[in-house]
Amino acid sequence: MESPAGLPVMRFVAVLAAFGALAAPAPAADGPLTLAEAAAMPYAPVVMVVDTVSSLGPLAAEPQAVTLADLVRYHGHPCDGLLVAAAGIAEGLKRLFPDGVVDRTDLVAAVNRSACYGDAAAYLTGARSRYGSLVIDPSLGDEWIVGRRSTGWSVRVILRAGFKPPELGGMERELRAAACPAALIAAVQGLQRRFALAVLAVPPDRAFEVRPLPGFPYPTGEARPDTAKRACGRVSADQPRRPAPRGNE
């Protein structure tokens, strides 16, 4: 069986947890989240993606894996926003690409103003603000909207209640307004760390609600110029329309 792009069927890669694991153990001490501990969590996302082979070339014949390490190199540091957004967006992409390989030439996305959310969305989807395919909507909360151009389907992925510490937002605002209070920095880092690890410790459908949408609720902008020849060499340019993605409400 092959995917719509003529690729071997792949599945999203995940490190499997011991059966029955529902929550991450509390960190032994406050401090910044590390890539090593995040990547070792049971449900750290690994997304299989495909891109064009050159600026005016067709889609690659083989997918490549995008890991948390790749995202951290792009973003600059492992943080709760980056990792939670990556897990949520990866769950949404699974609904849009049930064969398991994400075509990063075929996506649009919307996030709030968070730099962390925006970087996760741009890297995992290939959407870009300069082409209008990555929409910044300040009204969005802890949620991400991802759409697939070729099918017209979109999903809204929402972080479920109970994962984000309710005091985190206030403490982050307090820290931004302060100088360099070591105790507050450590406290915020500890909360962010526990938040991220708690999300990565459970199956994604426990952490996120996925709602199918009939379409992308924003203008989709223009396709990236380096995807203009994405369909060259494909087995068939006419693919059957896929069924709508299912939610998990």
Image: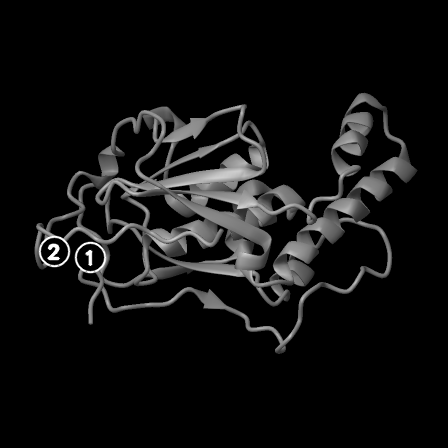
Residue found farthest to the front:
249
The disc placed on residue 140 is none
- Residue 17, quarter of picture: bottom right
Does 194 sit above or below residue 175? below
Question: Is 30 or 11 nearer to us in this picture?
Answer: 11
Tell whether label 2 touches label 1 (CB within 8 Å).
yes
Q: How many marks are shown on the rendered structure?
A: 2
The disc placed on residue 234 is 2
- Residue 55, quarter of picture: top left
Q: Looking at the picture, how far across and down is residue 130, in whole percent? A: 37, 25
Residues under labels 1 and 2: Cα distance?
7 Å
Query: Which residue appears at 56% of the width and 41% of the height?
Result: 75
Q: Earlier in the sequence, mark 1 or mark 2?
A: 1
218 lies left or right of 119: left
Residue named by callout 1 = 5
Secondary structure of residue under mark 1: loop
163 lies left or right of 11: right
Secondary structure of residue under mark 2: loop
Q: Looking at the picture, how far across and down is residue 112, in whole percent? A: 53, 29
Q: Looking at the picture, how far across and down is residue 172, in whole percent? A: 76, 32
Query: Which residue appears at 33% of the width and 68% of the height?
Result: 10
Q: Residues within 10 Å of mark 2 (few under 14, many from 20)?
A: some
- Residue 114, quarter of picture: top right
Query: Which residue appears at 8% of the width and 55% of the height?
Result: 236
Q: Looking at the picture, how far across and down is residue 145, in whole percent? A: 43, 38
Does 47 sit above or below residue 144? below
Inspect the image, locate mark 1, and give the three-letter code of the amino acid beneath it. Answer: Ala
Inspect the image, locate mark 2, and give the three-letter code of the amino acid beneath it. Answer: Arg
Q: Residues within 10 Å of mark 1 (few under 14, many from 20)?
A: many
Which image quadrant: the N terminus?
Answer: bottom left
